[in-house]
Image (spheres, rainbow, N blue to C red):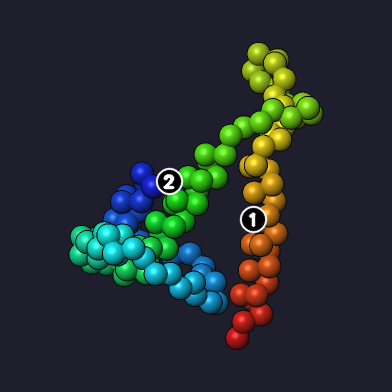
Amino acid sequence: MGLKNLVQQWQQNAAEKRTPYEYGVRLPLHDAAKIKALAEMYPGRTEEELITDILSAALDDIEASFPYVQGKQVIAEDDQGDPIYEDAGLTPEFKERTRRHLKQLREQLEAAP
């Protein structure tokens, strides 16, 4: 989900599993004021939920911004029969590292009392 869809999501209720630990951040004053303003506008969301949602959307946008780098291996063909090459850019590495960490986090969550 991108940042553009965030307001739509806030108007609905979505719950996702959370890590068993917290990340602490200190926001610049202007950003903290924006979070407080959003919390007033969406009273059903806590400041922590808003920060979590914004961070999640920003991470999705960062992943989408990684440039495609054409690799050497053909992985498919398009509708016209033209080759589609593997992505040799940052996206595959990011996805693999994300999968590895997600597996570890799920295992930690299952092991938590």
Residue kind at label 2, given as amino acid type: Gly
Q: Are marks 1 and 2 in contact (CB under 8 Å)?
A: no
Instruction: Compare residues 61 and 28 and report the one nearer the observer.
Output: 28
Quickly name the residue at label 1.
98
In the image, residue 35 above or below residue 71: below
What residue lies at 46% left-to-right and 56% top-to-bottom?
Answer: 56
| 28, above or below 19, in the image | above
Q: Amino acid at mark 1?
A: Thr
- Residue 40 is left or right of residue 12, and the answer is left
Question: Which is nearer the eye, 27 or 90?
Answer: 27
Along the polypeptide, which appears first: circle 1 or circle 2? 2
Q: Which circle marks residue 73 in the picture?
A: none
- The single residue placed furthest to the right in the displayed view is 73
- Give the position of the C terminus as an image quadrant: bottom right
Q: Give the vertical position of 111 relative to 52 (above or below).
A: below
What kind of element bears circle 2?
Answer: loop
- Which residue lies under the disc numbered 2? 2
What is the CA distance from the residue labelled 1 to the residue labelled 2?
A: 17 Å
Return the residue found at the far front: 28
Asked whether residue 104 appears in the rendered view, the answer is yes
Question: Residue 70: percent from the left, percent from the top?
Answer: 69, 28
Q: Secondary structure at mark 1?
A: helix
Foreground pick, 80 / 55: 55
Res. 35 in view: no
In the image, residue 89 sits, relative to residue 95, either above or below, namely above
- Crowding at mark 2 (Cα within 10 Å: few <14, some 14-19, many 20+): some
Q: Where in the figure is residue 59, as x and y percent of width and height?
A: 50, 52
Quarter holding residue 106: bottom right
Q: Position of residue 41 (x, y in %)?
A: 20, 60
Residue at 64 percent across and 62 percent down: it is 102
Which residue is rendered at x = 78% and y = 27% of the image? 72
8 with respect to 75 (left or right): left
